[in-house]
Amino acid sequence: MTDAASADAANNGGPAGTAVAHVTATTSTATAAPTPPMKLYAQYCFHLSPTLNAWCPMRVADIVHLDQYVEFEGQNVFFHMNHPIKWVRIAGVVVACNEYHARKVYTVDDGSGETIECVYDPPRPSRQQQQPPPPTMPTIMSGSIISVKGELKTYRGDLQAHIIKMTVLRSTEQEVQFWAKTAAFARETLYKPWVVDRKIVRQCRQAAEAVQRAKDEEEVRREMQQEKEERERKEKEEQERADRLKHREQTMDDLWEEEMYEKDIDWSKIGPFSVHDGIDIQEQ
């Protein structure tokens, strides 16, 4: 069983500097045979993957032994060989049903020798806006045969499929069709290495670097604009403060002169002075 890191972590790093990364899978079983080093394409090539953005019909035995690598922790991306996988489709019989508050957990056995927990966590209503009610889930009980489309996540080191869509299979024909898809997917895609031409890898790297440069330049422009606005704001405040001070001084001068003239002072006997000289003039 893969010792996958917590899915709550976030990986916001830039594109890798090389086209491929040599990494080794980590497993929780100490006695398991070591996985040989594999070539993994950098994340900027993932949009070319036939598995990452697709519903991958898989056996549970293949799902629970998917690998997770340090370079991609926190992204809910797991690997079979060098195929990145995030979304899966499984089918099997429900062998256990549990409910924890509003969360429902169905343990599914597809006969491949392993079981997996399929988790349905209904969306919580928002107080700010009215949301449509969650979709009605079919009635599921132990013994039901279901088909699940879900997103892979880890919980306490174990992989779970968080349900996006779940249906009850009503006939053997539906099961046969699913297993035929699973076998074809494994034969044509899953068990073949994912190969991308070096020229295309180089183009993807250059495109990723161009995008990163554009983001960096935009960030620099944003910071410069913020600094300019802050500088202009401070200059405006200083100018407004100087204007208020000047207006206050002018107002005081005007009031003082007006008061002196109202007292009918003989200015020829006083001589020149400034309003700031602090002269106490008595009324004649």
Image (spheres, rainbow, N blue to C red):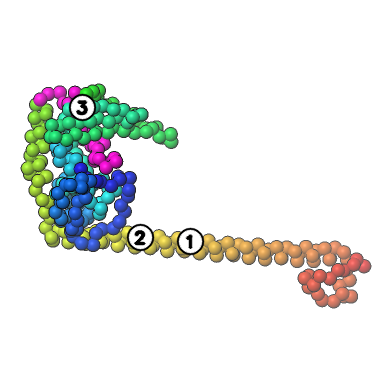
- Whether residue 135 is visible, yes or no, is no
Q: Which residue is mark 3?
A: 95
Nearer-N-terminus badge (1/3):
3
- SS assignment at label 3: strand
Q: Residue 85 at what x, y percent from top left?
A: 19, 45
Residue 129 located left or right of residue 161: right
Residue at mark 1 to residue at mark 2: CA–CA distance: 16 Å
How crowded pointer 1 is (Cα within 10 Å; few <14, some 14-19, many 20+) is rated as few
| 269 over 153 or under it: above or below | below
Residue 57 lies within the magenta run: no
Say left or right for 39 vs 101: left
- Circle 3 Cα neighbour tier, 10 Å, few/some/many (<14 / 14–19 / ≥20): some
Q: Residue furthest bottom?
A: 271
| Left or right, residue 84 beside residue 180 | right
User: Residue 268: x, y in percent?
Assistant: 87, 75
Q: Residue at x 50, y 64 (%)?
A: 231
Query: Would residue 164 be counted in the magenta stretch?
Result: yes
Q: CA distance from mark 3 to mark 2?
A: 53 Å
Magenta-highlighted residues: 143-172
Q: Amino acid at mark 1?
A: Glu
Most extreme residue toward the right is 284
Label 2: state its secondary structure: helix
Q: Nearer the viewer, residue 53 or 190?
A: 190
- Vertical position of residue 103 compared to residue 270: above or below: above
Question: What residue is drawn where x is 32% and y is 31%?
Answer: 103
Tell me the number on the disc at residue 79: none
Residue 162: image x %, image y %? 26, 36
- Give the residue number, with chain letter if any, for mark 2: 218
Marked residue nearer the N-terminal end (1 or 2): 2
How far apart are labels 1 and 3 at the CA level?
63 Å
Q: Type of residue at label 3? A: Val
Residue 229's disc is: 1
